[in-house]
Every structure is written in C-alpha cells, then in structure tokens.
Amino acid sequence: GGFLETEGPLRLIEEAGLDIAADDLCLGGRGLAFGAGGGGGGVREGARPGTDAERDAESAAERALAHLASLYLGRVPCPTKHPPERRFTFVCDEAARHGVDGVVFLLQKFCDPHAFDYPELRDRLGSAGYPSLLLEVEQGALSRGQALTRLEAFAEGLREAVEGGRAG
C-alpha cells in the first residue's frame, strides 16, 4: 500500500485475528527494502593529508557512497514510478517468502498510482493462490465497523481455505 498516517488500520487487521507478515508500505517494508551490505570504511588512524592512507580512506568513502547510492537506486519503486514490474515481482516474492495465506490491500483513497496498479497486482497474487481484500483508507482512517467486519470475514475465509487444504 501507500502511506499510512496512523497505525490504526494495521491494529484493526490484527484485531480481526490476522497476522501481518510483511508490508509494501511506502514508509514500511518497501521503503526499507534494501540490504545492509558491506562497503565503506572509515579513515584509518594516523592518516595524513596526501598520504597513501588518506587516499585509501577517500577511496573507501567513495565506495561507501557509491554503495549507498546503488542501494537507494535499486529499491523497489513506488507505484508513481513505472514500469511496475519490479514492484509486482517484489510483492509476489514477499508473499511466497513469508508463506502468507492472503493479502490485505490498504489503498489510499484518491491515490491514482496505487489504484492503477491494484487490479494487476490483485490478479497476479490471485493467480499465485493468494486471496486478497481491498480496504480504502482516507487520511489514515477507515470506517472501523465496516472494515472490521470485512477483515473478520476475510480471516474466516482464510482459515477455512487453510483447513480445507487451500482449496479455492
């Protein structure tokens, strides 16, 4: 999903008896989805301007900066950036990696990029055997009673599917 202003929708998902195994939030899993690879290194003790040690330190700093830049540039893109294939692959791979039974989409109302991507992503997840539920969120809030009822029904359907050997 997109940006959540509060943790309310996430708490509601848990209140409905669902566990959150992963997320695709702008300031959550997707925003932090890059490894903490090595690289870099600080200035060695005793380095003096113009010495080999200083040049090595500058080279290490340049490598560290280049590594950090490559991590940022290699992140899974936000739906405002297209083509969306990398994000679709990321979400499907994360669902498989975490062994989820289903996916809840929290869609910011009036967020056209997420709304545009939703049908294709829903269909890909469905083809891979992951049922999904769409909840629209407006400025971090949603209709609590209606959302909780829908989440509880979704949770019950997931339990039945798991108990029935993931039929359907």
Image (cartoon, rainbow, N blue to C red):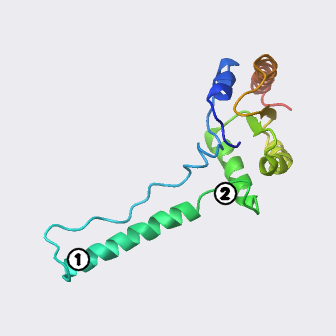
Cα distance in 3D space between marks 1 and 2: 37 Å
Residue 150 vertical position relative to residue 36 in the rendered view, above or below: above
Q: Specify whether residue 6 is in view.
A: yes
Up/down of 51 relative to 57, above or below: below
| Number of residue marks | 2
Question: Which residue, given by chain and number where applicable, does mark 2 sit on?
Answer: 77
Residue behind mark 1: 54
> Which residue sits at x=76%, y=39%?
108
Q: Is residue 18 in view?
A: no
Image position of 91 (left or right of 58): right
**In the orientation shown, which residue stands out farthest toward the front?**
139
Q: Secondary structure at mark 1?
A: helix
Q: Position of residue 6 (x, y in %)?
A: 62, 30
Front residue of this view, candidates 160 and 85: 85
CA neighbours of label 1 inside 10 A, class few (<14), some (14 to 19), many (20+)? some
Mark 2: which amino acid? Pro
Q: Which quadrant holds residue 160? A: top right
The front one of 106 and 92 is 106
| Image position of 17 with respect to 51: above or below | above
The percent coordinates of residue 125 (x first, y second) are 79, 44
Q: Quadrant of the N terminus?
A: top right
Whether the residues at callouts 1 and 2 have beta carbons within 8 Å, the answer is: no
Q: Position of residue 105 (x, y in %)?
A: 76, 37
Residue 87, position in %: x, y? 70, 54
Residue type at tag 1: Glu
Quarter of the figure with the C terminus: top right
